[in-house]
Image (tube, grey):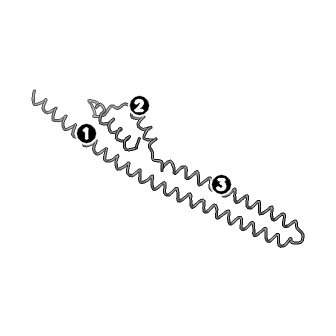
């Protein structure tokens, strides 16, 4: 069910509620209201739920990037050890292994930065969409409340007229 349909059902529950004779309060079915609140929770837009998934994906991307970076560094170290073991090119091997390690670390940092930027962009888009939908829901709720207030005023005026009519007929 869509969020707006659920809000309309909430409005109907309030409008159809029995009014207490003293104080102007309403009697509503607790279970019906709580069921509707549960349905409203389930109707929260996917964008809001997706924001949590985007965060988890970001964390996974970061973990993967770190693992990949670590694997590259370990491979570079294995290559370095192998090159050092060759006695004829020890100096060259040491230099090359340092270059490989630095290159691997730079690639790992870049991979992490890229993953971070992608996750931030997805999170920003989801947050904007969620904020927009929440604003729409707030505007609709305000209009429903205003209509309810107008209906209540009309009912109160009718009650006042009925009460006055009863007093005059005595």
Q: Residue at x 41, y 54 (%)?
A: 132
Query: Which quadrant of the figure has residue 2?
Result: top left
Kind of element beneath mark 1: helix
- Mark closer to the chain start, 2 or 3: 2
Q: Position of residue 141 (x, y in %)?
A: 35, 46
Q: Crowdedness of circle 3 by 10 Å Cα count: few (<14), some, many (20+)?
A: some
Disc 2/disc 1 C-alpha distance (Å): 24 Å
Assign the C terminus to one quadrant of the image: top left
Q: Residue at x 28, y 30 (%)?
A: 20
User: Is 98 displayed left or right of 126 in the figure?
Assistant: right
Farthest residue to the front: give it.
Answer: 1
Q: Position of residue 78 (x, y in %)?
A: 80, 61
Q: Which mark is residue 63?
A: 3
For label 2, the residue is 31
User: Is 70 displayed left or right of 14 in the figure?
Assistant: right
Q: Crowdedness of circle 1 by 10 Å Cα count: few (<14), some, many (20+)?
A: some
Q: Crowdedness of circle 2 by 10 Å Cα count: few (<14), some, many (20+)?
A: few
Disc 2/disc 3 C-alpha distance (Å): 45 Å
Query: Which quadrant of the figure has residue 64?
Result: bottom right
Farthest residue to the left: give it.
Answer: 169
Numbered label tally: 3
- Mark closer to the chain start, 2 or 1: 2
Assign the N terminus to one quadrant of the image: top left
For label 1, the residue is 152
Q: Which residue occupies the foreground of this view, 153 or 73?
A: 73
Q: Position of residue 3 (x, y in %)?
A: 40, 44
Disc 1/disc 3 C-alpha distance (Å): 57 Å
Query: Which quadrant of the figure has residue 39?
Result: top left
Q: Which mark is residue 3?
A: none
In this picture, is 163 found above or below 115?
A: above
Farthest residue to the right: give it.
Answer: 87
Q: Position of residue 44 (x, y in %)?
A: 45, 45
């Amino acid at each position: 069910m869509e969020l707006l349909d659920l809000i309309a059902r909430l409005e109907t529950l309030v409008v159809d509620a029995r009014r207490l004779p003293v104080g102007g309060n309403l009697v509503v079915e607790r279970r019906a209201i709580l069921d509707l609140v549960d349905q409203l929770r389930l109707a929260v837009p996917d964008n809001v739920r997706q924001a949590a998934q985007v965060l988890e994906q970001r964390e996974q991307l970061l973990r993967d990037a770190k693992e990949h970076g670590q694997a590259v560094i370990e491979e570079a170290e294995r290559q370095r050890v192998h090159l050092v073991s060759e006695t004829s090119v020890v100096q060259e091997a040491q230099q090359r292994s340092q270059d490989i390690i630095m290159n691997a670390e730079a690639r790992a940092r870049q991979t992490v930065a890229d993953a971070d930027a992608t996750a931030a962009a997805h999170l920003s888009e989801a947050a904007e969409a969620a904020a927009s939908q929440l604003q729409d829901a707030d505007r609709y709720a305000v209009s429903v409340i205003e209509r309810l207030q107008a209906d209540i005023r009309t009912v109160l005026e009718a009650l006042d007229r009925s009460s006055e009519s009863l007093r005059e007929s005595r």
